[in-house]
Each structure stands twice: as structure tokens, then as C-alpha cells.
């Protein structure tokens, strides 16, 4: 059993703009979708994922418009919509409008979300964004799940983790014997078991565990907690951003 910090109620006030998408959320009978938004600093493009149990649509801003593609409910790519034309059309129209409005608020809105998450991490329960002129603001209320309490790295050198290619969101635990160099030696991996939605870990062959300073089983137990905190339990910024997208898309009031 691992100790876990308590879930906390947090409120944040944002300038979300006109929220035109919120006036007509799609009523398709597919249930409440999960929303994920992102912004790429280098390309200055935004993306939006709308995920129902029966399928997904992923949209990206491009020069001159929006590109989109579909996934089946299992996450597999498909060149056809997983829904009927009557369901697909309102989802695509609404999601395109939502992405456009989200993109128009970038990167300022994302910076506000990250700042609000930082305030939560400091123990505050309310964040209010700054505005340069009077605006109609929105109050967002979320319950942010507490992280597992994990020990710092107790082996030699230092470690980091990074995404790798593969199914079920795999990551590699990277190690370096020297504090002066970036971790670049993979010593273990973790991924999500789709059946249990829990992390599965494995040690990589050829690792000198004596040099690492911790036995393999202790490293894997530590990696499991790191994976849970960073890749399973929703973080504060992600929880707040999802609530922001739901408010912008009218899903806060449409079940």
C-alpha cells in the first residue's frame, strides 16, 4: 500500500473568450466525451482530442484551416468515422469550432492554466488570471487528485524518464552514473496494462545493478510509483485544462 495525498477542491478564474462552441454542444447520444488540448510552441499550432467510448476524433490547426482524423474505440487509426454520418457531422462542426476558439486563446490561456496549477502546488485553493481590460470571466471548480508519496531516487547517479515508441504509453527509465551528465542509459521500462489500467514494469537486460546502487526489484517498484504519478493520475494542469475545455465547449452543463 502506498500513501497518497488527499484530493483537493481548487477554483480558478479565466478569461475564456466568447465560448461560441458552448452554445451548441453535440447531442449525439454517445455520452460525455473526454477532451484533451495541447499547444506546440515551435509550430504555434494547437490540437484537440475528443474521445468517446465508441471512438475518437483528433483535430489539428494547420495553415488555412483544420485537419482531422479518426480512431476506433480501441484507439486504432481508421480512415472512416466510427460513428454514423448523422452523429459525425455535429461532432466535427462543434469540435472544429472549439479548437478554433482554444487556438485563438493560445498561448496565454495555457500559461494561465499552468500558473493556476503552480498555485495549487503551493497550497492555494483559488487562482485569478490577470486581464488588461474588463472582460466576462469564468470560474472553474475542479477536484484535483493527490499524488502518491514517493521517495526521491536513492540509487547512485541520477535518473530521468522519457516516452519511447510502442503500445500502451511506454516510458524508459534513463540513468547516468554521474550527476554532471544527463541520464541516457535505459535501465527499465514501464507501460500501461490496458486490461487493468495499471503500470507494468520490466528491467532491461545487461544492467549493472551494483553500479546503479539499487536492486532491480526496488527500482521497478520506484518506477511504478513514478509512472502512476506522471502518466496515470491526472496532474493539476491537465485536470484544470480539461475543465476549461469542457466549459468552452458547453460540456459543463450538457451530460
Image (cartoon, grey):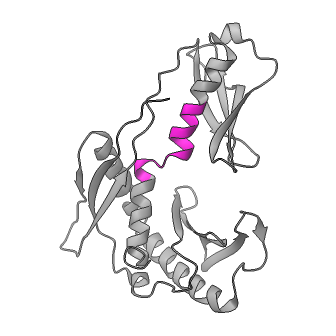
Residue 232 on the magenta span: yes
151 versus 36 height, above or below: above
Q: Is residue 183 in sight in this rendering?
A: no
Q: Is residue 55 in sight in this rendering?
A: yes
Percent x, y for residue 96?
55, 80
Residue 41 on the magenta span: no
Percent x, y for residue 136?
23, 76
Q: Residue furthest top?
A: 210
Percent x, y for residue 173?
65, 29
59 versus 110 height, above or below: below
Q: Quadrant of the C terminus?
A: bottom left
Q: Residue at x 40, y 47 (%)?
A: 145
Q: Residue at x 19, y 71 (%)?
A: 133
254 versus 144 height, above or below: below
Q: Residue at x 68, y 37 (%)?
A: 200
Q: Residue at x 51, y 86 (%)?
A: 27
Query: Which quarter of the figure has residue 81?
Result: bottom right
State left or right for residue 100 relative to residue 19: right
State left or right for residue 115 relative to residue 75: left
Q: Which residues are magenta?
A: 224-237
Q: Nearer the viewer, residue 183 or 250?
A: 250
Q: Residue furthest bottom?
A: 86
* Most frequent secondary structure within the magenta stretch: helix
State left or right for residue 18 relative to residue 134: right
Number of numbered tags placed on the structure image? 0
Q: Nearer the viewer, residue 116 or 215?
A: 215
Percent x, y for residue 118?
33, 44
Q: Residue furthest left?
A: 134
Amino acid at each position: 500500500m502506498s500513501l497518497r495525498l488527499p484530493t483537493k477542491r481548487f477554483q480558478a478564474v479565466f478569461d475564456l473568450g466568447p465560448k461560441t462552441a458552448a452554445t451548441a454542444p453535440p447531442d449525439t447520444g454517445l455520452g460525455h466525451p473526454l477532451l484533451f488540448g495541447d499547444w506546440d510552441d515551435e509550430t504555434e499550432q494547437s490540437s484537440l482530442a475528443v474521445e468517446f467510448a465508441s471512438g475518437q476524433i483528433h483535430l489539428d490547426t494547420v495553415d488555412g484551416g483544420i485537419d482531422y482524423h479518426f480512431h476506433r474505440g480501441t484507439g486504432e487509426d481508421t480512415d472512416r468515422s466510427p460513428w454514423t454520418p448523422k452523429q459525425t457531422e455535429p461532432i466535427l462542426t462543434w469540435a472544429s469550432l472549439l479548437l478554433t476558439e482554444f487556438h485563438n486563446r493560445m498561448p496565454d490561456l495555457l500559461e494561465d492554466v499552468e500558473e493556476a496549477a503552480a498555485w495549487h502546488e503551493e497550497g492555494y485553493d483559488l487562482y485569478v488570471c490577470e486581464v488588461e481590460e474588463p472582460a466576462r470571466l469564468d470560474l472553474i471548480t475542479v477536484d484535483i487528485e493527490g499524488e502518491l508519496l514517493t521517495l526521491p531516487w536513492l540509487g547512485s547517479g541520477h535518473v530521468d524518464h522519457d516516452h519511447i515508441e510502442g503500445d500502451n504509453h511506454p516510458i524508459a527509465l534513463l540513468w547516468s552514473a554521474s550527476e554532471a551528465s544527463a541520464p541516457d542509459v535505459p535501465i527499465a521500462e514501464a507501460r500501461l496494462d490496458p486490461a487493468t489500467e495499471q503500470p507494468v514494469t520490466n528491467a532491461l537486460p545487461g544492467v549493472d545493478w551494483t553500479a546503479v546502487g539499487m536492486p532491480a526489484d526496488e527500482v521497478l517498484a520506484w518506477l511504478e510509483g513514478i509512472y502512476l504519478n506522471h502518466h496515470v493520475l491526472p496532474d493539476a494542469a491537465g485536470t484544470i485544462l480539461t475543465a476549461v475545455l469542457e466549459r468552452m465547449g458547453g460540456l459543463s452543463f450538457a451530460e
